[in-house]
Image (tube, rainbow, N blue to C red):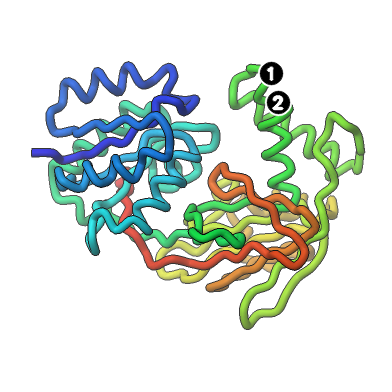
Amino acid sequence: MVSVALLSNPRSTGNRAMLPRIRSFCAQHGEIFHYEVESIDQISAAFRTIARVQPKVLVINGGDGTVQAALTELHLGGHFGDSPPPVAVLPNGKTNLIALDLGAKGDAIVALERVLEIARGDMTDHIVPRELIALSDGGVRPVLGMFLGGAGLADSILFCRNKIYPLGLPNGFSHVLTALAVFMSLIFGIRAAFLPPRPSQVRVSLIRQGQIEGRFALLIVTTLHKLLLGSKTGGAGASGLQLMMVEQRPLSLLRAMVAAAFGRLDRQALDGVHLQRGDEIRIEGDRSSVILDGELFQANKGRPIVLKQTPPMPFLRLAA
C-alpha cells in the first residue's frame, strides 16, 4: 500500500546532487510512490497518475518553481476531488521558506524519513490548514504560492539571483554578500552599478482599508506563519493575507530588523513599518517587480497585480 507519493523535479538545483540518494531511499521503501518530472509542464499528468494510487501524503521535492507549480495544479486541477492529501515539502531550492514553515529543514532524506514515519501512524496532530496566495496579473489562470516579496526585497532577490549566484559561491555566503550589498544601498544610500537599485514607487491597496503609496525597502505578502528572522504572522486563528511593508528609510528598516530579531515585530507599532491583513491586495507601480515563491511578475500603472486568499489546504507539519 502506498503511504507517500513523492513528486521530484530532477532539474532543480538542489536535486542535482541529492536525487541519487532520494532514488535509493525510495527503492528501499515500497510505501513510497516516486514520480519524476522533467519540467513543470508535466505536473498535471503526474498528479493524474498519483491520484490513482491514493497516497496518504503528497511530498514535493524541487525548487521554488516546482513547489509553486505543484500547489497551483493541486488547487486548480481537481485531480484529488474535494479531499486532496496533505502536502509536505522537502528542504530544497534556494530559500525553503515553505519547508521551514512546516518544520522541514536540514537533510532532505531525514525529512522524508520523518514524513514516512508520520504517514505510518495517526497523522491528525500533524495536519495543518494553510491558505494560499492566488496571484492574478491579467492572465487566464492565477498562480498560487505562499510568499510574495516586492519593492526592495524583490530587487534584492533579483540582485542575488542575477549577480551573486552566478559566482558559484555557497548559498549561505551568497545571502551574506547580498545582505551586505542591500545594507550599503539602503542604510548608507550608496548607489552603484554593482549594488541593488533604488526601489520603485508602488501603491498598495487593501479592500476596505485604503491604500499606501511610497518606496519600500521590504514588501511582503504571505500566508506562512513565520516571516523573516522567525517573526510570527499571527499563527492559528489569524485570517487574511498578511502584508508587511517597511519604508525605505534607514531608521524604519533598523527598527523592523531589531523588532524581528527579538520576535516583537507583530506586537508593537513602529514608525515606517506597516502590518495589515486583507482578503484582497492590489499592487501597482511603474514596472515594479514582485516575486511569488521564486517566479517573477511585474506590476505596472493601470495593470495591478491582484492577490487573493484561497480556501485552506491541508499540509503536513513535520515538527511535533
Residue 91 placement (x, y as % from top left):
42, 34
Q: Secondary structure at mark 1?
A: helix
The reply, left or right, for residue 243 in relation to residue 49 is: right
Is residue 252 visible to the viewer in this orientation of the structure?
Answer: no
Residue in view at x 68 percent, y 65 percent = 304
The reply, left or right, for residue 315 in relation to residue 283 is: left
Vertical side of 19 occupied by 102: above or below: below
* Separation of residues labelled 2 and 1 (CA atoms): 6 Å
Residue in view at x 74 percent, y 59 percent = 300
The residue indicated by pointer 1 is 167
Looking at the rendering, which quadrant does residue 29 occupy?
A: top left
Q: Secondary structure at mark 2?
A: helix
- Give the total of numbered labels: 2
Q: Could you tell me which quadrant the N terminus lies in?
A: top left
The image's mark for residue 117 is none
The residue indicated by pointer 2 is 164
Between 65 and 224, the residue placed more toward the observer is 65
